[in-house]
Amino acid sequence: MKNKNSSKLFAVAVSTLACAGMAKASTDYGPAIWRSACSGHWNTTGNGHKFLVVHDMEGYYAYEVSSGGGLRSCSTTVSVHYAVNGKQDTSTDYAAGEVTQFVRESYYAWHARCWNGSSAGVEHEGFRSNPAWYTDAMYNSSSALYRHLADHYGIAKDRNHIVGHDAKSSSAWVSWANANLGINASCNTHDDPGPYWDWSRFMSLINPVTGTIVDNSSAGFSCSANWATASSSTDKYGLTIAITARKRLAIRPRGRRVSPRAVTPCTFGIRKDQIVRRPRPTRSRLQPGHRP
Ligand SMILES: [Zn+2]
């Protein structure tokens, strides 16, 4: 959700032609597509980018990134550095997780009132009252973008420095930000991205734990709470094995041995380093009639 900016008097009279433009790759962030905000709808100077703000659009990505659309309009006094698509709502919509850049990172977009001069902002497709657009693809793309922004500006990847537009509702953050960011932490009134934004997940993606991800979409695989889970198609990797009773393969998931006999035919993922090949048994339990 966007705020009007106090600098609007300085940047309104701009030709609508400046809003149009061919989509092209972002210079600042490789995965993004550059679709400029209305020319001049940003400040070129500020106090340094000290923290990052999470917004939701209360609307749809396709409209916001369209030529002359919401975040590119010359009729508003709103802009933001980036936007992320949540869902491909129609066959003509953009891909889920697509990222658009509107304002160069070195500039200051008009996304959060008095925080503008000290922050960078990203809009996310969707609505604070409905989690449907906060998809795996969005979290994956957005977390990578925030990681990039934090690294670029030297911003700590924590909840003091990566906040929602609704952070004013946290008295602890307001106190901290007033003391440490040199801003009036209470100058915003908006309440996005709202209760459905999964901060725990988002921050975990921004600060990934080194490890192995397995595909847990198969009903044949279960795991303990120590394993992170996801349902998107882009963040699954690892080894998938089709287990049949004929294969003499012992699986030791998290230290628990499962004999071939105990494994019903299924497909599941398992960490490569947890696969133990058993030596060929001298007496096969699978073929009771056989003697070596
Ligand atoms: Zn907002």
Image (spheres, helix red, strand yellow):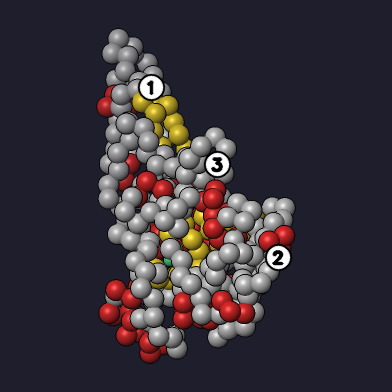
- The circle on residue 93 is 3
Q: Is residue 41 visible?
A: yes
- Quadrant position of ligand 1: bottom left
Q: Nearer the viewer, residue 192 or 255?
A: 192
Q: Which residue is mark 1?
A: 244
Q: Amino acid at mark 1?
A: Thr
Q: Which residue is mark 2?
A: 15
Q: What residue is rendered at 59% in x and 61% in y?
A: 73
Q: Amino acid at mark 3?
A: Asp
Q: Nearer the viewer, residue 200 or 168?
A: 168
Residue 83 in the image, given as x and y percentages of width and height: 53, 58
Residue 227 in the image, given as x and y percentages of width and height: 34, 50
Q: Is residue 61 above or below residue 217?
A: below
Quadrant housing the C terminus: top left
Q: Which SS class for mark 3?
A: loop
Q: What residue is rendered at 30% in x and 39% in y?
A: 222
User: Would residue 114 appear left or right of 95 to someone viewing this image?
Assistant: left
Distance from the alpha carbon under mark 1 to that under mark 2: 67 Å
| Label 2 crowd bin: few (<14), some (14–19), many (20+), radius 10 Å | few
